[in-house]
Amino acid sequence: MSKVKKPKSAPSLDMTPMVDLAFLLVTFFMLTAKFRNMEPVQADPPAATSLVQLPENVMLITIDTAGRAFFDISGKGTRTKLLERMMQRYPGTSFTQEQIDQFAVMGTFGQPIENLSAYISADNETKKKMDDRTKGIPLDSLNNQLGDWILEGYAAFVEDAQANGMTKEDLKKNGLRYAIKADANTDYEKVQKVIDVFREREIFQFNMVTNLKGSETNADAVLTAN
Amino acid sequence: MAEIIDNSGGDGKGKKKAKKPAVSMDMTPMVDLAFLLLTFFVLAATLAKPKTMEIIYPKKAQDDTTKTKVNFQLATTLLLGEKDNEIFYYSGMFKPDSTQLYLTDFSKDGFRKIMLNKNARINDRVNQLKKLLQDNMIPQSQYEEEYSKAVNDSLAPFVVVKTLPKTKYKNVIGAIDELNLVNVRKRAIQDMAESEAIALRQKVAELKLDN
């Protein structure tokens, strides 16, 4: 083999285009990524042109196509107080302080209160199994746990707000709102059942969670076109 | 490693400078940090808050006497069937033998056009108000007040959305959305009466025969 000696110099490589491309890709993935839902239930809300945002203090009931109801409420303090109240209402159940703390940072859940304690302490895999098996929070007239969650949720919210020095005026402006997030293909009767639970408790105003429709059907566009 | 090769030195000005060594900079830590930050933001980013639509339901009527009396001349009833394409409407009061159901949909030229015509007077007023608001002739609070006065006019047409148990939720939301677009604020969601459900089924069967 003949030895060909090349002039030695530090091998250099311009990385700028690669870095540019990498940033571009990362930005692209960041913008298009659909985050895996951490919620225990998949509900794809229907499309509408409404631009009202989900309020800050909100009680959210999620309903899937099978009509299972899942409950969620915002606010750590509210959630702590809520679980304590529920514990009093259902004397058969008990939660440890640790479970209450975990519940305070948990999201949506759809377990009957008998299983809630086990659900809070379960690991992610067991939780998933329980979510798949659950029939949602019971809301029939014999065992209307959803109604109790609603009433106690409101009471806990007010208690927490007052503890934080919110005045009546603030509460009026920024009070607890009720949102319903139902899958677009749910039968309306199933949504109605949940709404009736609210109506029986003198709550009549709801925020229905929707996906934003394309802007060409926007409210203003329609009216100016006509 | 990335390098910045400085070629500009030495020429142009006539002065001969000593040849500078190529300026090289190790960009790896910067890139690493940038990726780390990006990853963090991607994971920590909260998605845009979902949008919502406000719906106010009426109190449950205890018996027939507490039901509000309505002027049926102003009424339009929207019947939502079990399938997406089974959307019908009729005007006025329902008479099982004579009421004609019309097929409609939630497209731009569907139910929206019908209600825009029926609600033309209210819409004109709302457009007027919107223009005033845009030109800063009236404050937001006054606009809202006037708007609610306009849409709650005693002679404003109203719409009853009637559903079957198996009506899809998205069609109910679609209907309310259309009503929002055309400024129909006087509306209600009700269960369909048996006579109306029969008429709807007949109409669906009829249309299928036509095809």
Image (cartoon, rainbow, N blue to C red):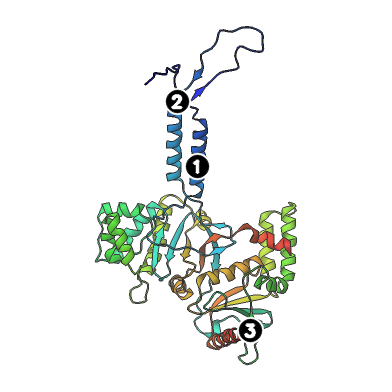
Q: Nearer the viewer, residue A91 or B108?
A: B108
Residue visible at 45% across and 44% down?
A: B42
The chain carrying label 2 is B
- The 10 Å Cα crowd at callout 2, few under 14, some 14 to 19, many 20 or more, is some
- Residue A106 in the image: state x and y as whole percent: 35, 54
**What's the residue type where badge 1 is placed?**
Leu
Label 3 sits on residue: B101
Marks 3 and 1 belong to one chain: no
The chain carrying label 1 is: A
**Residue pictured at 39% horizontal, 19% vertical:** A2
Question: Helix or strand or loop: what does disc 2 sit on?
Answer: loop
Whether tag 3 and tag 1 are in contact, CB under 8 A, the answer is no
Tell me if mark 1 has few (under 14), some (14-19) or many (20+) residues whose alpha carbon lies within 10 angstroms of its own.
few
The image quarter containing residue B105 is bottom right
**The label number, if any, that marks residue B148 in the structure image:** none
Q: Is residue B199 left or right of residue B139?
A: left
Amino acid type indicated by mark 2: Met
Residue at 56% x, 18% y is B6
Expressed as whole percent of the image width and height from the top left, the position of residue B88 reads 61, 79
Q: CA distance from mark 3 to mark 2?
A: 75 Å
- Label 3 or label 1, whichever lies nearer to me, is 1
Let me know if residue B42 appears in the view.
Answer: yes
For label 1, the SS is helix
Query: How far apart are labels 1 and 2 at the CA level?
Result: 21 Å
Q: Compared with residue B76, is residue B12 higher up or lower down, i.e. above or below?
A: above
The mark closer to the camera, 3 or 2, is 2
Q: Position of residue B196 (x, y in %)?
A: 57, 86
Q: Amino acid at mark 3?
A: Leu
Residue beneath disc 2: B1
Q: Secondary structure at mark 3?
A: loop
